[in-house]
Image (spheres, helix red, strand yellow):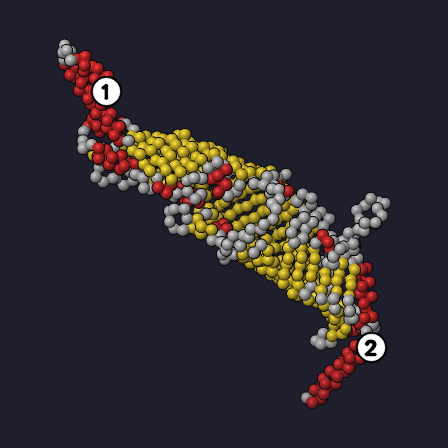
Amino acid sequence: MKRFITTLAILLVVVVAGMTALVLLVNPNDFRAYMVQQVEQRSGYRLALDGNLRWHVWPQLSILSGQMSLTAPGAQQPVVSASNMRLDVKLLPLLSHQLAVKQVLLDGAVVRLTPGSTARQPDNAPPDPTNAAPSLPAQRWTFDIDNLRVSNSLLIWQQSVGKELNVRDLNLQLTQNRQRQAHLELSSRISRDQRELLMNLNADVNLSRYPQHLSAQIQQLDYQLSGADLPKEGLKGQAKMQADWSSNQAAFSLKNLSLSANDSEMTGSASGTLGLRPEVNLDLHSTMLNMDSLLGLQISGSDDLSLQAQRSGPAPVIAVAQPEEQPSVLSGIDGQLSLSVDKLRWRGMDFDRLMMKLSGRDGQFALSTLRGDIGNGNFSLPGALDFRHPQTRLTLQPVLQNIAIAPLMKAFELPATLSGDLSLTGNFSGAGLNVPAFKQVWHGDAALNLSNANIAGLNLQRMIQRAVENSSARVHGPAKQAPGSDMQQITGKFTLNNGLVNFAELNGQSSMLNYHGQGSVNMVSQQADILFGVTVTQGWQGDDELVQRLKQTPVPLRIYGPWSGLNYGLQVDSVLRQQLQDEARKRLKQWSDRNTDSSRNGSVQKLMKDL
């Protein structure tokens, strides 16, 4: 045992002595020009190292540098700059005075991907006689370092037109083997407009054919987005995919895509090209898509307007000059979307087996399929979308079959006082994809049929019966209303114009009454004004003549005023007055027929005409 320990001690002394001698005999500054030359030959980029290079022995033989920068040819700003850099080198090549770097470590670096850091030809460069596109050194870039680590750094990204995006707390570790199979680990934090995105990435990357082709297996991508104008709990989830990129065709593909966001999840694939006019093709499937959770909506249990946005606060208002309104970004993208959702929740309504197919070019898309099931009913909403305007324009031809109307009215923030199963066929168009836009700037027309309808707080039969009983003791209604007698069948036609719904025709009937009417509902000012003619056909008891009159005569009923406090105008007196006039006219006629020779017969005839 003593010999073994002694042998280890001797080996350790020899190694330490050898490394010490090597450090003393080899000056790291001798490699400065070599490193600058190798970087420029391999990539065309200019490496600048300020200050003296120095050795760092423990726990890894390394070269330390001061301020460093890496600049593309013709660029105004460096692509990478750091206050210090560490190069972990291999020991054996140093014995022959050669430098072999196995890891580069940058701490506190600033990475710029901006127009100012992009490679460009000098202004006085002669034109290419072959008229070929200039070959910038950046296109010859290869990554030959086995290990790269970037910690506590900042990435500044900016397109030619747009704001800067700062990626803070950037931590990157990239390792690769001789076959250029790399493993990438990345974490970062992005803050902008009072919102923050945390991201962690773990992926395997194939660099063997880079830059012509690049493929990556993203094993794990965790993200969390929180801040202003987002749900209070934020948006968080994971993603996995197989990504491929071909620079020759500027084509990409995402296979085995798996994405989760809060309690929603989606799988599928994506492909396309990224040229002057990108083309994107999506084929997606979701077992559960909860739009209420993604939009931060909470549904209360009351029957009133109960959709509430549960958000962290409004987005900041920035006092800058307002640019001219531009078309939607989707106007510059072509492609198609195929989406199937097993279960979808939107504004408190649960949909099943949702199918959507969308395709188009030049900003105009055809919505050939949008259908699904809800409860015992189903719907179809084919149409078209136009993204060439600041507000997306739509045309829809809805066909609804037996859709429960109460949750539908709550979803559109209308008083949920009406129940029943709605069937509808219509044609609508407008600008904007949200409910407020539908209620304010859309227009169209439709025919509706509402079965098993019940208007909460408005029993037309009881209203008329009580009004008649209060005006006349000759008739009365039943003491107790039969169960289900208030269920109605309602049909009608209406037009929608910038929030004003005009009912040109509205008819209803039940086992006890029937009615017809017309009027309007203003969804913007939340006002209603509808005039009905209601006839109670069953349940009367008392004077036979008056009962027959009530069964055949519509009673005028006006419903008007704000939704929060509707007013009712019921004109029962006119019906009773007409009944009295008819009865008086009948009796005067009987007297006149019996007394044809009477001198007062003329006066009676005149009185009959006046009635």
Callout 1: SS: loop
- Neighbour class for label 2 at 10 Å: few (<14), some, many (≥20)? few
Q: Amino acid at mark 1?
A: Leu
Of all residues, the one furthest to the bottom in this rendering is 2
Q: Can see residue 402?
A: no
Picture quarter with the N terminus: bottom right
Displayed quadrant of residue 594? top left
Q: Residue 35 in the image: x percent, y percent?
A: 80, 65
For residue 601, above or below residue 170: above
* Left or right, 365 with reference to 208: left
Residue holding disc 2: 25
Q: What numbered label is drawn on residue 92?
A: none
* Left or right, 362 with reference to 600: right
Q: Which residue is painted at 26% across and 31% down in the image?
A: 572
Q: Residue 601 in the image: x percent, y percent?
A: 17, 13
Q: Amino acid at mark 2?
A: Leu
Picture quarter with the C terminus: top left
Residue holding disc 1: 611
Q: Residue 564 in the image: x percent, y percent?
A: 37, 43
Displayed quadrant of residue 418? top left
Of badges 2 and 1, the one in the foreground is 1
Q: Earlier in the sequence, mark 2 or mark 1?
A: 2
Q: Residue 151 in the image: x percent, y percent?
A: 66, 65
Q: Between residues 346 and 413, which one lies in front from this camera angle?
A: 413
